[in-house]
Image (tube, rainbow, N blue to C red):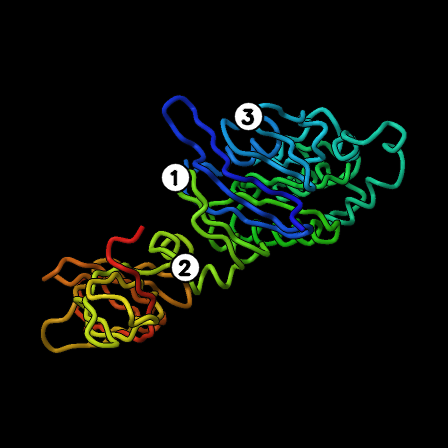
Amino acid sequence: MSSLSTQALVKRFGDVVALDGLDLDVEDGSIMAVLGPSGCGKTTLLRLIAGFLTPDEGTVSIDGKVVADNTHVVPTQRRKVGLVPQEGALFPHLDVAANISFGLPRHERRGPRVAELLDLVELPRDIADRRPSELSGGQQQRVAVARALAPEPTVLLLDEPFSSLDAALRISTGRAVMNAIRAHKATAVLVTHDQDEALSLADQVGVMDRGRLLQADTPSSVYARPESPFVASFVGDGSLLPARMEGDRAVCSFGTVTVEDSSMGPDVLLFIRPEQVVVLPVLDGGSLVTAVAFHGHEAVVRLIDEGSREVIMARVPAARMPQVGQRFGVKLYGPVLVFERGSA
C-alpha cells in the first residue's frame, strides 16, 4: 500500500509550470529519493506534500486520504508529516533535548523519548544539553531528523539535508539517518541532486525534469535500464553519441560497438559509460586528450574526435593516466545503451 501518493499534480507560479501532471507513489515504509537538476520542481513537490502550497490541479494523498486538491487543503499540522529542511533549522536558543522534544505533547517531553531518538540517529546521549552552535554540521542534521521523527510522522520529507556537509561526513550522516528512518519504519521522500546519494541511500529513485517524473524504479533498475537519454545522463556518467545501426551493431565516430537493443534504427543515440571505453596508444591519428580529472586510484579522460568534434569519456587506472594533448586510439566494449535519435 502507498503511504504517499500524488496524482496529476500541477503547480504554477504565474506563467511558470513548476509541476506538470506529476504522479508519484511511495510505498509504506520505503524511502524514495527524488533526483533532478535545480529548478526541476523537487522542492515544490515537497512543499505541496507538506501543505505549504496548494495544488492548482491534482491531488496529494497520505495513508489513503486526500489531504490536498484544488478545492480543499488539510492543514500541515494535521497531516502527520515531518520535514527536515536543507540546513536543519534547529532552534539556536534551545538545547538538543528541547529541540528534539519540541513537537511532542508537553507530558512526553521529560520522558525517555529524547534518549531513544538520540540512540536512533547514532548520537551520544550526553549531547542532550548542548546548543546547536556546539555541534558539528553532521550532528545538527541528525538532531533535525530526530526532531522530525519524534511525533512519529506517517511521512518524513528531507529537502537536500546533506548538501552542506563535506563528502566524508555526507556519507556517514546519510547512512545513519537512513538507518534511523528504516528502524522507525517511516515512509520518507529524500530530495537531492546528488546521484550517488540517491542510488546508495534509497529503496526507489525517481528522476524529475521540468516538473515531470520521467522514471521511478529501484536504484539498480534506473541505473541499468534508464528510459531516456536524460535519465541515463543524470543518473550515471557517460557520453551521448549519435550513431547508425548496421545489423546488430552501431557505428559512431569512435568505432563500432554492440548495443543492448538492436531493433532500433537506423539513426540512434548511444550512451557509453567511461568504463566501456579503453584508450590505446597509436602511432598516427587517434583522438585528442583535452582534459584529465585525477581521482586518486583512477582518472577520467576526455577525448575528442577532431573530425566530428564529438567527445567521449574514458576511465583509466591512475598509473596509466595520459596527459592533455596526447593522442590515443579508442576501443569500445558493449553492449551499450541505445535510444532512438531525438528521444527526450
Q: How far across and how far down the image is residue 211, in percent? A: 43, 38
Secondary structure beneath disc 3?
loop
Q: Residue beneath label 1, please?
A: 210
Name the kind of residue labelled 2 in the image. Answer: Pro
Q: Label 2 to label 1, Cα distance in Å? A: 17 Å
Q: Residues within 10 Å of mark 1 (few under 14, many from 20)?
A: some
Disc number lying in front (2 or 3): 3
Secondary structure beneath disc 1?
loop
Q: Earlier in the sequence, mark 1 or mark 3?
A: 3
Say left or right for 175 vs 253. right
Q: Label 2 to label 3, Cα distance in Å? A: 33 Å
Q: Which mark is residue 226?
A: 2
Rendered view: 25 above or below 210? below
Foreground pick, 331 / 44: 44
Name the kind of residue labelled 3 in the image. Answer: Asn
Query: Of all residues shown, which one is farthest toward the top?
Result: 14
Q: Residues within 10 Å of mark 3 (few under 14, many from 20)?
A: few
Q: Are marks 2 and 1 in contact (CB under 8 Å)?
A: no
Q: Which mark is residue 174?
A: none
Say left or right for 227 vs 167. left
Q: Residue beneath label 3, please?
A: 70
Say left or right for 47 vs 125. left
Query: Of all residues shown, which one is farthest toward the front?
Result: 71
Q: Earlier in the sequence, mark 2 or mark 1?
A: 1
Rendered view: 341 above or below 43? below
Q: How far across and how far down the image is residue 63, in percent? A: 69, 41
Q: How far across and how far down the image is residue 277, in percent? A: 29, 71
Q: Are marks 1 and 3 in contact (CB under 8 Å)?
A: no
Residue positioned 55% across, 53% down in the render: 168
Q: Earlier in the sequence, mark 2 or mark 3?
A: 3
Secondary structure beneath disc 2?
loop
